[in-house]
Image (cartoon, rainbow, N blue to C red):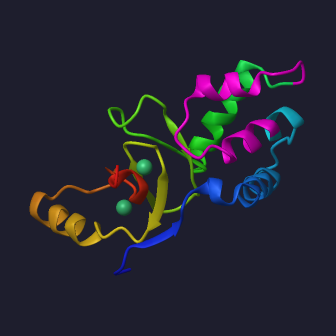
Amino acid sequence: MSDTQPTTAAVAANPSTWVSMVRSAWQSAGMRITEPRMRVLRRIANYTTPFSAEQLFNDLNQDRFSPGRATVYRTLEQLHEAGWLTRLHPGMSDSGYIASWPGHIHHLICTACGTVVAFEGCALGSLIEQLSTKTNFSIEGHLLQIYGRCPSCRNN
Ligand SMILES: [Zn+2]
Ligand SMILES: [Zn+2]
């Protein structure tokens, strides 16, 4: 792939699509779909900026049907492992997660307001090939997050 293609502003631009994608992935994996877990999903899908596990737990904890801390943390862990969540690099932000999709996706993050743009088609492939040839490393993966100011923050 040659060009970098922004996919969408964020999962928050289309939260219900993300929720149903995760739900059907859970179904195919034979995972139990419970109301507390669905609440976790729906809340995650509606964050427009990165969030932390504690923030998520607090935002959800409003009535006696709310998911417990263990459910929140376990669901986060499973979503992260399956590629539905990206963890922000330490140093970028205290709050750790953004909703994403499985696959080769990277994120562009506004350091002022936390707006996230996902993109596919990262151009690191040829660099990685060169590195592998030069160093004889067998390269297994890479981390990339790009930060800056979004159009509305750059004018302030
Ligand atoms: Zn911004
Ligand atoms: Zn990449």
Query: Seen in the image, is 106 located left or right of residue 148?
Result: right
Q: Position of residue 138 (x, y in %)?
A: 26, 57
Is residue 53 magenta-colored? yes
4, above or below 55, in the image: below
Q: Which residues are magenta?
A: 39-65
Query: Seen in the image, is 141 located left or right of residue 59?
Result: left
Query: Seen in the image, is 108 located left or right of residue 40?
Result: left
Q: Nearer the viewer, residue 148 or 138?
A: 148
Which residue sits at x=74%, y=59%? 21
Residue 60 figure quarter = top right
Q: Position of residue 109 (x, y in %)?
A: 41, 50
7, above or below 18, in the image: below
- The residue most toward the bottom is 2
Which residue sits at x=63%, y=35%? 76
Q: Position of residue 51 (x, y in %)?
A: 55, 35
Q: Nearer the viewer, residue 34 or 148?
A: 148
Count of marks, rendered view: 0
Q: Position of residue 43 (x, y in %)?
A: 72, 39
The N terminus, quarter of image? bottom left
Residue 155 figure quarter = bottom left
22, above or below 57, in the image: below
Which residue sits at x=45%, y=65%? 119
Q: Is residue 146 visible?
A: no
Is residue 128 magenta-colored? no
Q: Is residue 74 visible?
A: yes
- The residue most toward the front is 156
Q: Nearer the viewer, residue 6 or 125?
A: 6
Assign ligand 2 to one image quadrant. Answer: bottom left
